[in-house]
Amino acid sequence: MPIHTSPNYWILETRHSAYAFGLNKSNLLSHCYWGKRLPFVKDYPAPFEPSGWASTDGYDHFIPEEYPGYAGTKYTDPTLKVTFADGVRDVVLSLVDFKTGGSPQPELALRFKDSAYPLQLTLHYRIHEEYDLIERWVTLENLGTESISVERAFSAKWTFPHGNGYSLTHMYGRHIDEFNMQREILTPGLKVIESRRIIPSHRAVPWFTVEREASENHGDVFFGTLAWSGNFKITAEVTEYASTRLSIGLNDWDFAWQLKPNEPLVTPSAISGYTPNGFGDASRIFHDYVRNELLPHGKVLHKILYNSWEATLFNVDETSQANLAEIAANMGVELFVMDDGWFHNRNWDNAGLGDWFPDAKKFPNGLGGLIKRVNDLGMDFGLWVEPEMVNPDSDLYRAHPDWVIHFPTRARTEARNQLILNMARVDVQDYIITTLDKILSENNIAFIKWDMNRPASEPGWQDAPGDPRELWVRYVYGLYRVWGELRRRHPNVIWQSCASGGGRPDFGILQFADQVWVSDNTEATKRLSIQEGFSQFMPAITMEAWVTDWGKETVPLEFRFHVSMCGSLGVGGNLLEWNQAERQMGADCIELYKSIRHIIQFGDQYRLIAPQKNNYSAVQYISKDKSEGVLFVFRTLIPDPFRFPVIHLRGLDPEALYSIEGFDQPRSGLAWMEAGVRVELKNLQSKVIRITRLTQS
Ligand code: GLA
């Protein structure tokens, strides 16, 4: 059993790591250990007892609590803050009991009650043993009659081995420039990473690593994420006593929740892990976890899709789409996706959102004719929708102007000429379920790209059943209900999550979506950097990557294909303008991708040379049984003379013999990893090199 319990001490063990906590002498639940799994139960340290403290700080300020409520003399960043009906803002929790259980993953739940008020808190732990991951969330319940105002309820606080000098890596970005990695030393005080936009947003990603001098292949790394598709907050704190901690959860900015009797508040899951093997291993752990545990279709190879957006924008109709489909099919594309522009009155971005039925002028006989033509070409058909949105110029808005998020006395600020439907409202949820269910039921649709193109503003909700500031959270639970219901009714549909590119990439959305559209930036050299950032926590199978015409004047088509082949390959260029040679190159690359995609989508990924730091890069994928791999090498722009550094392959069986495409002599896996390979490239050249195991070790 990976959970060891005693009346006041708990050890959670995974395959290689362990996490321990216990009640200290004052009955505060204190973090004790996180790191390599130790041989004996008695190896784990006892809860910390401060030996002395000053009147300026107080005893409880020193305790690295698992889940500190704002109370007493705790001046560090709390995970919980509440106001009781009589105005008291101090929470004193004592353990009531705990239980273990859970299937298939073991779980531990510790139940606490406030000493004077009817507040109950349950800390939940779930162990993903084979992934070295621990999942945490909390449930808050009101056992009384008067409501309690919850002003902060994070999912977890993670405490690192005592000391300072840790570095935090997080990601920041903007539209068309997502997933930039930022590594910085944590100094005393609080570092906050957050989203206030109702989606995680391009600006920040609910993901982190914390370590001291780790590298891609070596060193202790603590890493984690929040499975949540809305406002989140990460606070990383170094106390004045050199204790380093990180909290993660729902953002408490503009947040308050009326906790009513019989209506528990359940927070999203925080999932974290420890590895002694560097950033690369941390990523691979998450890749496996996502594919095996989260994705609805994690074991299904993704089809190569064509998307019409960059070719036709809003000018879609049966003929224009069918013309593109024909060329795409000849190149070997397997799924044809019609993007924006197909629905009622949608000729530009200023009208139509909300009216999810085919435009009568563009598709007088519905979508059936186009879908049949696509299917007759041997391809599946996919469609773009943006269900959470409405244009003021739409039948839906004219009928239900009160359905949008707004304050009645304030302007309804439009972005891209659109407003946001209040997904927290059940009538809005039901409308979206009904309209999308109709489209999916009446048509042979295999794929949906679900877009979300603007953040929230003027976050009013007049008929809120509780505190109107619950909107930020209830919106996301509403979204999950809609998407979950549609998935239940149409289980074979593959969904893609898009929010103006990579605005909503998180482990919460992956319960529904198998893919993420990571950026509207499809320029290949920039894309390399975006893809490196995305790969920190998401596997290549989730990374939809189109080859488009961006940068075609300078970046060769083959290079553009190679970049997109590092994920789930798609094509988005205007095929009508591709000449015969370009279409042939497309067909060749697609054929090559079909022969290696199982390695990319299901294998282990090794980032060998990082594009965010260099004008050259290399990334390798190797099948789980180590028998076949593929190496991608890119050079962007570097003045000559330049010699590409030796590339050290990774993840090979050291004793087995491997041949590497382009090199005469087979060598041991160890040789390819230690002596490496030399690849020479000119500016804007790329190579795809296959790795084949010839003998068993
Ligand atoms: C967003 C998406 C694009 C495209 C357009 C359509 O910008 O990110 O890929 O679908 O919307 O309007």
Image (tube, grey):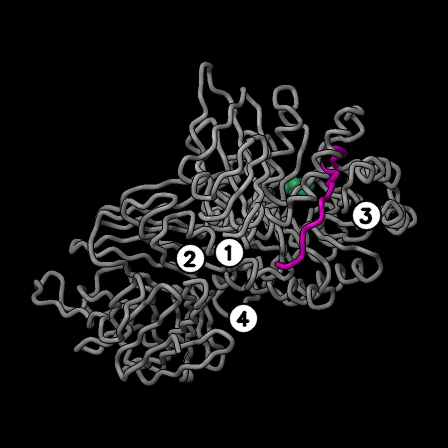
Q: What residue type is labelled 1?
A: Gly
Q: Mark 3 or mark 2, which has the lower sequence index?
A: 2
Secondary element at tag 2 = loop
Mark 4: few/some/many CA within 10 Å (<14, 14-19, 20+): few
Q: Which residue is drawn at 78% across and 40% down?
A: 332
Q: Mark 1 or mark 4, which has the lower sequence index?
A: 1
Q: What residue type is labelled 4?
A: Pro
Residue that mark 2 sits on: 251
Quarter holding the N terminus is bottom left
Residue that mark 4 sits on: 465
Residue that mark 1 sits on: 230
Mark 1: few/some/many CA within 10 Å (<14, 14-19, 20+): many
On residue 300, which mark appears?
A: none
Distance of label 3 from label 2 (alpha carbons)? 43 Å
Q: Confirm or deny contact between disc 3 and disc 2 (CB under 8 A).
A: no
Q: What stretch is highlighted in magenta?
A: 298-313
The one nearer the camera, 673 or 230, is: 673
Magenta-span inclusion, residue 586: no
Displayed quadrant of residue 134 = bottom left
Q: Confirm or deny contact between disc 2 and disc 1 (CB under 8 A).
A: yes
Q: Could you say where residue 380 lies in the image, as x and y percent from the top left?
A: 79, 50
Q: Say if 633 sits above or below 154 in the image.
A: above
Q: Which amino acid does label 2 sit on?
A: Asn
Displayed quadrant of residue 319 = top right
Residue that mark 3 sits on: 379
Q: Say if 482 sits above or below 284 in the image.
A: below
Q: Which residue is drawn at 68% across and 28% down?
A: 549
Distance of label 2 from label 1 (alpha carbons)? 9 Å
Select label 3 or label 4 by which is in front: 3
Ligand 1 closer than 8 Å to label 2 CB: no
Classify residue 5 as left or right of residue 374: left
Q: Which residue is drawn at 89% across and 50% down?
A: 372
